[in-house]
Amino acid sequence: MILALGSLLAVGAEPAGFRAGDLPVRAAMFNGVSPAALGPFLDFVREDLPREGVNTLVFQIDYNYRFRSRPEMAAAPAFTEAQIKSLVQACRAAGVKLIPLVNCLGHQSWAGTTHQLLTAHPEFDETPGLFPGNKDIYCRSYCPNHPGVHAVVFDLLAEVAAAFEADAVHVGMDEVFLLGEETCPRCAGRDKAELFAQEVRTLHDFLASKGLRLWLWGDRLLDGRTTGLGKWEGSYNGTARAIDLVPKDIVVCDWHYDSAAPTPAYFALKGFDVVICPYHRPAVGVAEVDDLVRVRSDNAVNTSLAPRLLGVMTTNWGQSDRFAAAYRAAKASGAKAELPAVETFIRVFERVRGARAADEAAPGADKH
Ligand SMILES: [Zn+2]
């Protein structure tokens, strides 16, 4: 027995093939890419993403696509299929996995502008006729219990996934504040955690039927009060219990821009694959990478837990052409980038590469 135990312990600290410092997901997320700026963005994809070690591009397209299945759903400026194919080719050449992002449930408006789903189909609105001009609300939501909404949303997700030649779709679902409203005849009085989870399951099951994995933002699955994360990065509106009601095979994009919250470990302990997402504070992004690698390293013998901490995804909420220009200027000069999001992107992937190099240089690394 003693010998057997000794042999077991001597097998090594890490299971074969697992490298704590080698993050499998090294992603960058972009919105604000316009069809007119696609050419320079493709250069950025081909030349700069591989240079940084980025292997996944999450590209927010929403309704800016010339849908064939639902032509009335194309919002200007809309990408053509040929333009998306050029993006697919650029990603393939760069060794970058491409994932489209289409905001589902929430974020159906921005400031005074209501987006295409609810302008083409105002009957899907959770609060139809209320909040004229979108005054006094953050964003509109569609009603997850409207009997017609999923036929449209499914067509859009399927067509976008096919055009992107993707095996995963990011469905957004962050910052959903209008949900289960008392004025909705279908949702009034319903449990908001169950409503949110129901929508995740509905989208998940459809995507799974097409061989597609669901990615989403994680904020509605975190209790904003208990964690102290507030009502944006966490939930104040009763959705947090959905964390125990949604399928475990989704990918949670756990965004924290102002501090490195220890939530990736929480999602991983709950059984989810998780990606930490910084934005515009370089020190926070670096700390998030360090924390993720440390938890992977500390738990490297736990073949269930550690591999669920997939990696990092930088976000960009400004214009992509400005991002690419600021990135190139910073790389050329060696100076700090003009845009905080760019500086974060540079520092985060520098840290990611450093973690991998440290792992490779560690004693015993060759045994893997
Ligand atoms: Zn409703």
Image (spheres, rainbow, N blue to C red):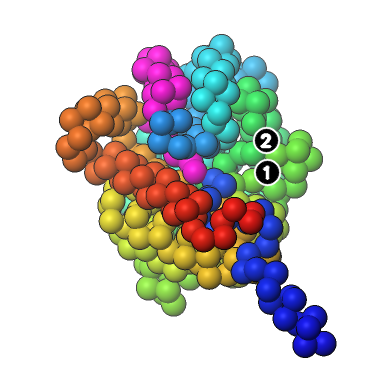
Return the residue nearer the eye: 257 or 68.
Answer: 257
Magenta span: chief secondary structure: helix
Check disc 1 and report its element: helix, strand or loop.
strand
Mark 1 and mark 2 residues within 8 Å of each other at the beta carbon: yes
Residue depicted at x 54% and y 46%: 25
**Residues in magenta, as a range:** 26-48
Residue under label 1, please give it: 213
Is 230 displayed left or right of 158 in the figure? left
Quadrant assignment for the N terminus: bottom right
Q: Which mark is residue 78?
A: none
> How far apart are labels 1 and 2 at the CA level?
6 Å
- Number of disc labels: 2
Q: Decide whether residue 114 is among the magenta residues.
A: no
Q: Position of residue 205 (x, y in %)?
A: 75, 47
Amino acid type assigned to the residue bearing label 2 in the image: Asp
Residue under label 2, please give it: 167
Residue depicted at x 43% and y 64%: 291
Q: Position of residue 8 (x, y in %)?
A: 74, 75
Check disc 2 and report its element: helix, strand or loop.
loop
Q: Is residue 328 visible?
A: yes
Residue depicted at x 37% and y 73%: 228
Q: Is residue 188 visible?
A: no
